[in-house]
Image (cartoon, helix red, strand yellow):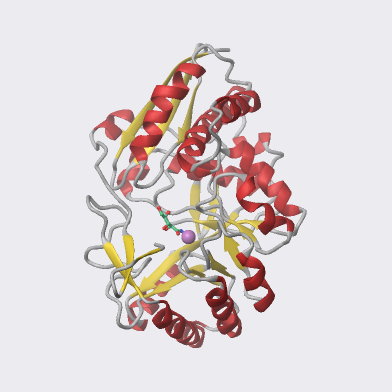
Amino acid sequence: MKIVDARVVLTSPGRNFVTLRIETDEGVTGLGDATLNGRELAVAAYLRDHVVPLLLGTDPHRIEDTWQSLYRGAYWRRGPVTMAAIAAVDVALWDIKAKVAGLPLYQLLGGASRERVRTYGHASGADLPELFDSIRARLAQGYPAIRVQTGVPGLKLVYGVRHAQDSSQSARPVVEDWDTGAYLRNLPRVFDAVRQEFGPDLPLLHDAHHRLTPIQAARLGKDLEPYDLFWLEDCTPAENQDGLRLVRSHTTTPLAIGEVFNTVYDYQTLVSEQLIDYVRSAVTHFGGVSPLRKLFDFAAQHQIKSAIHGPEDISPVGMAAAIHLDLAIHNFGIQEYAGYTDLTHAVFPHAFTFTDGYLHPGEAPGIGVELDEELAGAHPYEQAYLPVNRLQDGTVHDW
Ligand code: EZ4
Ligand code: CO
């Protein structure tokens, strides 16, 4: 079997997605997600100009060899652009292999370790009444666990809270504002109110989105302990892995980190010293199913569980690959699932289902996602950026 064509499809059915389609001489095709929010064209060029010429004529069944040759052969290792491009190839090749086998991908990963995949959804509000309505809406959709993001008194635009200008993608970066002190004072009060309204049993999560220093994160973790969070996510910019020792020594609030990481090396200290409880990388940004499976096996040795990144900017192709892994691995934790617009579901018809808050990859051979190229072509790429974050005096802060 040989790869005879590979092409990159850009589409924006509400937001931008980058998809790689690999074709073989036997007519079997595979899809991979290469979406990197705000930097989509860089990955598309990396694939088109540098990766596709290397794939033509090679055997699509040699997934590990192809992965290693793209990773080691470039000489320039790691980084989100490189790893998103390699991820798309890896997933497309797993899709092809599973289709040839006539099996859904999870069967090639060892088969189902559970019947369905638990998710969490996003709730947010500028104030408590708005937040409570949002939580109720998610509960009505069946979500068994909920991420809570809220406005901060004195701040106009805050991460994760919908507003008129809201867009995690816009033609110029939206400027959000930030004050760490106001945030640290406000958040425990919000969780106190949410627990009083919704009771002790509902699993609640929160994403600090890389804004805190280790000592601030340590304080927040302690202050949130009475509210029994499922996790506190990305409390610090964790490329400073050593900083997590300080956070960990001060709080029993579980910690989740890793959505911006792209190789196992970003996790070495965090995992080997068990400084976190959940690893958050996406199939799409971590080089694909092959290396993410290895990360989960490494994490399992340290009683750390999976929590694959699943916001709107992971395409249904990347989401499907994630759900197959979620179903197969033993140390599954939870899957983030933000859902998609109707148009996105139509551009990417898929076998995976979302029922009563649980996902299942379905039984279609491969990853179980198709791409309607005509519909995709009718919704072309649009220039778009993520927001940036500034302190009250104008200083740029982590977003
Ligand atoms: O802000 O994927 O946990 N989820 C997140 C996401 C990220 C976006 C950035 O592109 O933090 O919403
Ligand atoms: Co996050």
* Coordinates of residue 207 in the picture (x, y in percent): 48, 67
Taking the image as drawn, is residue 56 in sight?
yes
For the point 55% across and 50% down, the residue is: 281
* Front in this rendered view, residue 130 or 281: 281
Above or below for 314 versus 366: below
Q: Quadrant of the N terminus?
A: top right
Above or below for 343 versus 178: above
* Front in this rendered view, residue 306 or 140: 306
Q: Is residue 236 left or right of residue 17?
A: right
> Which quarter of the frame holds ligand 1?
bottom left
* Coordinates of residue 59 in the picture (x, y in percent): 59, 16
Outermost residue, right side:
301
Q: Is residue 361 left or right of residue 107?
A: left
Above or below for 188 versus 261: below
Q: Is residue 16 left or right of residue 257?
A: left
* Coordinates of residue 249 in the picture (x, y in percent): 69, 75
Q: How many marks?
A: 0
Q: Quadrant of the C terminus?
A: bottom left
* Front in this rendered view, residue 312 or 277: 277
Q: Quadrant of residue 60?
A: top right
Taking the image as drawn, is residue 361 in sight?
no
* Coordinates of residue 376 in the picture (x, y in percent): 30, 34
Above or below for 230 versus 222: above
For the point 54% across and 79% down, the residue is: 220
Q: Quadrant of residue 306?
A: bottom right
